[in-house]
Image (spheres, rainbow, N blue to C red):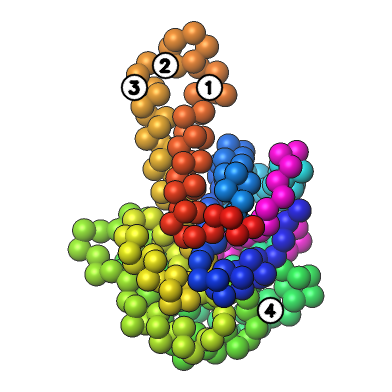
Amino acid sequence: MLVSAKEMLCKAKAGRYAVGQFNINNLEWTKAILLTAQEQNSPVILGVSEGAGKYMCGFSTVAAMVKAMINELGITVPVALHLDHGTYEGCLRCIDAGFSSVMFDGSHYPIAENVEKTSALVKLCGEKGISLEAEVGAIGGEEDGVVGAGECADPDECKAIADLGVTMLAAGIGNIHGKYPANWKGLSFETLAAVSEKVGDMPLVLHGGTGIPEDMIKKAISLGVAKINVNTECQLAFAAATRTYIEAGKDLQGKGFDPRKLLAPGFEAIKATVKEKMELFGSVGKA
Ligand SMILES: [Zn+2]
């Protein structure tokens, strides 16, 4: 059964660990993440971007696949199905499709408009028991097709959005989507501490989890981060394992071309990456 991310994240914040959001792209991705969460007895959040939703034939297809897979695989750990960086309209469609969590990314709107749209979604999600993530301060990287350094959120704006009643808040603290450039300045713990102080118990979300050094991840968790998004790292692991298989000529041996064989090394690589992240974030055994 799908659950809202609220309870798992409040527990994580209180227990000083973080729950991973792992983005899904297809059946193999979803199965790898769900099985690893069950094996590690960890809560998990499946992230779906609007682009990935389109790729998988729409949000209702995704919700049906995930629900059926949880059932068929006997998954008993808490699983949230979450829209990642949604538009306002995307959030409405996911709520209708049966997602248990959505993110409204209003970070590119002026703060007044971000507040207005977030408020409307707080009401809708509240009625349906769906968790809602809001964002303040754009996360850097290729978020809008433009590669930029991560912004740092204004702690007072974070408080204004948190007070609307969202479930969790993504605040830009110099983090970036995708691979980090060699000259990256690192996370702004000053910003994170200031935001954390303003928003109290609210779980904070760290986007762009790929390539942030382990000590920075641990420090971020100690300062109130309870959800960490991982996307690119699973993609890199999948691609590398698939490349190794093909380069070794294994697709040319016997029935090595069978997609169930050809995709297996990538599947295992996603599982290994997810396990490693769950261990780092401290969510193992917390289901
Ligand atoms: Zn993000």
Frontmost residue, 32 versus 258: 32
Write down the residue under mark 2: 250
Q: Residues within 10 Å of mark 4 (few under 14, many from 20)?
A: some
Circle 3: residue type: Glu
Q: Give the x, y percent position of residue 164.
A: 63, 86
Circle 1: residue type: Lys
> What is the CA distance from the residue labelled 3 to the residue labelled 4?
50 Å
Instruction: Identify the magenta region.
Output: 72-98
For the C terminus, which image quadrant?
Answer: bottom right
The answer to whether residue 150 of the structure is visible from this angle is no
Among the two numbered marks 3 and 1 on one chain, the one whose residue lies closer to the N terminus = 3
> What is the CA distance from the residue labelled 3 to the residue labelled 1?
15 Å
Mark 1: which secondary structure? helix
Write down the residue under mark 4: 122
In-image side of 197 versus 114 (left or right) = left
Asked whether the beta carbons under mark 2 and mark 4 sit within 8 Å of each other, the answer is no
Magenta run includes residue 74: yes
